[in-house]
Image (cartoon, rainbow, N blue to C red):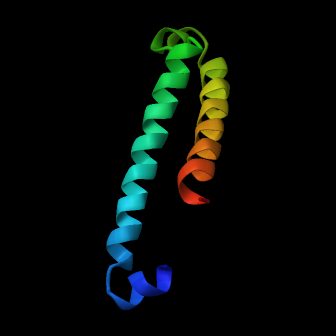
Amino acid sequence: SYATLFTGGKLNGYLADIDRQAEAMFLRLVKQMAEAEGVTEQLKADNQMEWVGRMNNIQNRAMEIVNSELIYT
């Protein structure tokens, strides 16, 4: 439990580990989704507004996945 981690002085290490896992998972998901959906550097060069909108959508979905699978479990 969190109380056990806190009183044992391990909570900060646990939270830092979760933070590292969440960041790695987020970056991996964004990369995979962008590749799968054709959101490329070429699109960024050709149509920056389209690229921004699609990347924002991908990042939002990736954050939802990270939160549901890692943070809120």
Residue 64: image x %, image y %?
Answer: 65, 45
> Does 71 sit left or right of 15 as displayed?
right
Q: Nearer the viewer, residue 19 or 7?
A: 7
Whether 3 is drawn above or below 25: the answer is: below
Identified at 55% across, 15% down, the residue is 36
Q: Nearer the viewer, residue 34 or 55?
A: 34
Residue 12: image x %, image y %?
Answer: 36, 76
Identified at 65% across, 24% down, the residue is 54
Residue 7: image x %, image y %?
Answer: 38, 91
Q: Nearer the viewer, residue 1 or 14?
A: 1
Residue 61: image x %, image y %?
Answer: 65, 37
Q: Nearer the viewer, residue 70 or 23?
A: 70
Whether 41 is drawn above or below 12: the answer is: above
Q: Note whether residue 39 is visible.
A: no
User: How many numbered callouts?
Assistant: 0
Identified at 42% across, 85% down, the residue is 4
Q: Quadrant of the C terminus?
A: bottom right
Q: Note whether residue 43 is visible.
A: yes
> Does 3 sit left or right of 20 as displayed?
right
Can you name the residue that lies furthest to the bottom here? Answer: 7
Identified at 67% across, 27% down, the residue is 53
> Does 61 sit left or right of 70 as displayed?
right
